[in-house]
Amino acid sequence: MQATTCSCCGKPLTDPVSVEIGMGPVCRISNKEKEVQNKNGNLFANRASYDFTIEQGIVCVVDLDNGRSVTNDAENVIADLAAKGIDLDTHLVIYRDTLGVWDQLQVSNLRFAGFKSLNERDKELAKLKVRT
């Protein structure tokens, strides 16, 4: 059975991804930010395991669901990308989280600065959305 209201705030869900997950994009991003602030996960767990590609000037990170999540290790993921020589002043960064949803990792001064909801299951649509 699919949800019709957000499990966090109770507001109606209108897009297919939110209905499938049972949570709206605002609440989902808010929960991600709380996870990062609280760092409820095991701080001694392995770092996030991920792959990335650069497509049309966008860094596309895929969480491999091994060790910490990219969500919980976002600061280190951004630091890794910068250390690999990726110009994060000119490249936007999107990632597919453990739910299979693409969102943006925001960067400021080569550091992780927060999340932005793209709320897309399709990478091509997420790449279009991140540019607007």
Image (cartoon, rainbow, N blue to C red):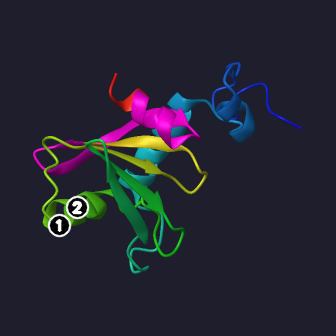
Identified at 38% across, 75% down, the residue is: 47
- Residue topped by disc 2: 81
Packing grade of label 2 (10 A; few <14, some 14-19, many >=20) is: some
In the picture of the structure, the residue carrying the numbered disc 1 is: 84
Element under disc 1: loop
Looking at the image, residue 61 lies above or below residue 117: below
Q: Provide the secondary structure element on which disc 2 rests.
A: helix
Residues shaded magenta: 107-128
Please say whether residue 77 is one of the residues in the magenta stretch.
no
In the image, is 113 to the left or to the right of 98?
Answer: left
Q: State the image coordinates of residue 124 (x, y, percent, origin top left).
A: 48, 38
Amino acid found under the numbered disc labelled 2: Leu
Is 127 located above or below residue 76 in the figure?
A: above
Horizontal and vertical percent for residue 63?
A: 48, 62
Nearer the observer, 36 or 91: 91
Q: Which mark is residue 62?
A: none
Q: Amino acid at mark 1?
A: Lys
* Quarter placement of the C terminus: top left
Give yes or no for residue 110 being in the magenta stretch.
yes
Q: Position of residue 131 (x, y in %)?
A: 32, 28
* In-image side of 92 versus 69 (left or right): left
Displayed quadrant of residue 70:
bottom left
| Residue furthest to the front | 56
The image shows residue 37 at horizontal and vertical percentages of 36, 52
Residues packed near mark 1 inside 10 Å, few (<14), some (14 to 19) or many (20 plus) = few
Q: Residue at x 17, y 67 (%)?
A: 84
Please determine whether, in this image, residue 8 is positioned above or below residue 13. below
Q: Do the residues under discs 2 and 1 have CB atoms within 8 angstroms?
A: yes
Taking the spot 51% from the left edge, 53% from the top edge, the residue there is 97
